């Protein structure tokens, strides 16, 4: 749950009883008179003791105890820097307060009216997504979730509706991704999604393995058949904007609840953390929730490929030839490249509905992590104008993306002598590009974006998010959908 937000257009004063204050300013060389900055004397004394210039707190937030015992943190935000950098410095300032586990935080924004508005948006969003605590299984949690946020210096008439929705979507994605694999199985995951669909008034439909076999979805079934319990399924959620017509966006997510690698078994160091291989589906769900809570005027079809990649006598193996739902035959080269198989049939189902735009999210390839690390995610598209919009949104949302080529001649590496296409190769350093080319075979001509989520997990947090699990993709998607609607 997100903390309750209370707003006051007036600056904070000494009569306010606060235990934890985050004071935010635009970047300045010196403090103007009559700014009503909380703890101004303590800040000046702290800077003098540390031999710091005031402007340095735009790089290194500082905190100190005030005379009344309040812990106050001060940070400056340089509006000439990127949104990612602005998010990062505010998150670091906030963490100095959250370390004490407060249940309430006071935000105090300063500057002119426009600057206070910008600072308020940044601070409220960062506080919401970091104030909530992700599920843990400890006897004693390290801290409690924030219960309330009190904002001074700016009032938003809509109570930051869009930012709250975005934060709720991010929290859902992170919360699901962090669940241990004995709790989040395909069966229990589907049960949670169905309950969420009921609460949010989404239409819920699922294609279980028996149905998928009848349909001829051999790519998905090949991966799912290795699990003892046949609880894998493709889940379809529909959210209507309340009108008879309008744009429809299809969201597709890879939901591999645990990935052993199959017969090409992963070594221990690479198998650890593979319960997070369902992150793409969690991001798609988070985007759907955020769009619903923000009441975006758009229809959304959400398709989630939920399964596990296990090893068993029935598991698929190298050199198998399978037939996908589209009729395409696929030569299996490596059983740990299962994500593109479950996505192939799911994309085919989504594409048949002829959406105006299709976006898929997946923790798909290790080679993209090798190429980018975990600070960016990679994007691919069959439309150049979508690539340009995606890059621009990466800058404005604070979730940065990098575009990669997927020209047709790359597909020469996927030529098979016995099937229509190879699933992958055994030794490609650019497997992320080959995976995108493979997926494109199941798209036809629908405008499509593919996001390979190399930034789904970053040690110590990334941008606005302070946890290792980042929920990357929710904020980017909401900003992208707004841009899509505006055009």
Image: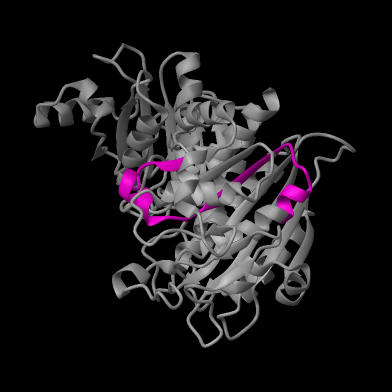
Q: Residue at x 49, y 76 (%)?
A: 317
Residue 73 location (% of width, % of height) = 30, 36
Taking depth in this image into account, of 349 and 69 the one nearest to the observer is 349
Image quarter for residue 172?
bottom right
Whole-percent x, y for residue 110 in the image: 41, 21
* Quarter placement of the C terminus: top right
Given residues 17 and 227, the one toward you in this image is 227
Q: Is residue 248 above or below residue 187?
A: above
Residue 446 sits in quarter: top right
Q: Is residue 49 visible?
A: yes
Q: Give the image quarter of residue 49.
A: top left
Residue at x 80%, y 40% (from the top left corner): 241
Residue 365, placed above or below residue 334: above
Magenta span includes 115 = no
Q: Given the current orientation, which residue lies at the most extreme front position?
A: 417
Q: What residue range appears in magenta?
A: 349-378
Q: Is residue 83 left or right of residue 324?
A: left
Residue 194 position within the rendered picture, expressed as x and y whole percent measured from the top left:
72, 65
Q: Residue at horizontal 41%, vertical 16%?
A: 111
């Amino acid at each position: 749950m997100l903390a309750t937000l209370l707003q006051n257009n007036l600056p904070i004063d000494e009569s306010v009883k606060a235990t934890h204050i985050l004071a935010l300013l635009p970047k300045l060389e010196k403090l103007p008179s009559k700014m009503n900055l909380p703890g101004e004397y303590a800040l000046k004394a702290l800077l003098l003791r540390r031999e710091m210039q005031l402007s340095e707190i735009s790089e290194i937030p500082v905190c100190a105890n005030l005379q009344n015992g309040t812990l106050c943190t001060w940070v400056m935000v340089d509006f000439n820097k990127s949104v990612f950098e602005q998010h990062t410095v505010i998150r670091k300032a906030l963490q100095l307060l959250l370390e004490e586990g407060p249940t309430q935080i006071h935000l105090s924004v300063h500057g002119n009216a426009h600057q206070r508005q910008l600072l308020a948006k940044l601070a409220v969003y960062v506080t919401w997504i970091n104030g909530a605590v992700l599920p843990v299984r400890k006897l004693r949690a390290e801290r409690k979730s924030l219960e309330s946020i009190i904002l001074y210096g700016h009032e938003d008439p809509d109570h930051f509706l869009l930012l709250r929705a975005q934060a709720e979507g991010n929290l859902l994605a992170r919360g699901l991704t962090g669940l241990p694999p004995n709790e989040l199985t395909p069966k229990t995951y589907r049960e949670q999604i169905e309950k969420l669909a009921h609460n949010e008034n989404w239409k819920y439909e699922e294609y279980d393995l028996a149905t998928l076999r009848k349909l001829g979805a051999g790519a998905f079934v090949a991966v799912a058949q290795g699990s003892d319990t046949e609880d894998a399924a493709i889940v379809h959620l529909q959210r209507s904007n309340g009108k008879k017509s309008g744009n429809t966006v299809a969201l597709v997510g890879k939901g591999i609840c645990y990935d052993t690698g199959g017969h090409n078994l992963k070594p221990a160091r690479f198998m650890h953390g593979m319960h997070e291989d369902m992150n793409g589906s969690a991001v798609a769900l988070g985007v759907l929730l955020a769009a619903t809570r923000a009441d975006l005027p758009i229809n959304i079809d959400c398709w989630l490929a939920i399964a596990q990649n296990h090893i068993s006598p029935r598991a698929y193996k190298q050199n198998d030839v399978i037939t996908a739902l589209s009729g395409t035959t696929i030569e299996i080269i490596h059983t740990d490249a299962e994500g593109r198989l479950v996505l192939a049939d799911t994309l085919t189902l989504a594409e048949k509905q002829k959406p105006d735009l299709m976006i898929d999210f997946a923790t798909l390839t290790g080679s993209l992590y090798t190429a980018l690390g975990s600070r960016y995610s990679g994007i691919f598209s069959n439309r150049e104008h979508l690539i340009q919009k995606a890059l621009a949104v990466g800058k404005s949302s604070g979730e940065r993306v990098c575009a990669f080529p997927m020209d047709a001649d790359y597909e020469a590496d996927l030529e098979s002598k016995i099937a229509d296409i190879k699933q992958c190769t055994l030794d490609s350093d650019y497997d992320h590009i080959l995976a995108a080319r493979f997926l494109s075979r199941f798209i036809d001509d629908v405008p499509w974006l593919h996001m390979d989520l190399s930034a789904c997990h970053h040690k110590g947090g990334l941008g606005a998010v302070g946890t290792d699990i980042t929920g990357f993709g929710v904020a980017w998607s909401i900003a992208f959908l707004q841009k899509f609607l505006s055009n």
